[in-house]
Image (cartoon, rainbow, N blue to C red):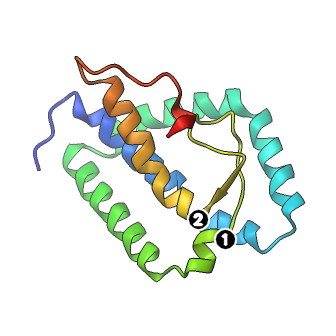
Amino acid sequence: MSIRPGEQRTLEAIEAQLSRSDPRLARMFARLPVGASRVFAGLLDEGTGPFHWVNYVGSCAGARVFPRRRMVAKLDQVTMALERKLRAETDARLRSGMRYPVRWDPFFKDFMTLADLYHYPTQHFEFHARQLTLGQPAPHEARDG
């Protein structure tokens, strides 16, 4: 796969979203009382400013660590790993979930199931792809999707 210079940032963003949607944390919190994930999400929401800064700096630094060819390979690796995990999930596990920091991302809902988490990277990427496509208006409300 050949990557044009403008696509590098997009690939970094996809890989970051895929990594962020890793369901291990949600599985862990699904075993705890609901209040545990509510407190955790509240703490994360309080750290929204630093989160956005680290998210931006991390994406910029990622371009230095992962050159284009390596980024494509990493993206494929992460995508295939998540696909394998998704196939192994039971319906009950896909319905379990936890509270999320809604200030971090417009697609985060107060409570997200594992199914929501597996769908999240696609929603996030498609939203930004529409923003970057000329001639197509970007939706104003991401939470509707």
Density class for disc 1 (Cα within 10 Å; few <14, some 14-19, many ≥20) is some
Do residues under tags 1 and 2 come within 8 Å of each other at their CB atoms? Answer: yes
User: For numbered disc 1, what is the local secondary structure?
Assistant: helix
Look at the picture and state if 73 lies above or below 130.
below
Look at the picture and state if 38 lies above or below 131.
below
Q: Residue at x 83, y 52 (%)?
A: 38
x, y percentage for residue 135?
A: 23, 17
Q: Nearer the viewer, residue 50 or 87?
A: 87
Give the number of the disc on residue 27. 1
In the rendered structure, which amino acid carries the disc numbered 2? Answer: Leu
In the rendered structure, which amino acid carries the disc numbered 1? Answer: Arg
Q: Is residue 57 left or right of residue 74?
A: right
Q: Residue at x 75, y 34 (%)?
A: 47
Give the number of the disc on residue 114. 2
Q: Nearer the viewer, residue 62 or 51?
A: 51
Residue furthest front in the image: 144
x, y percentage for residue 89?
A: 51, 79
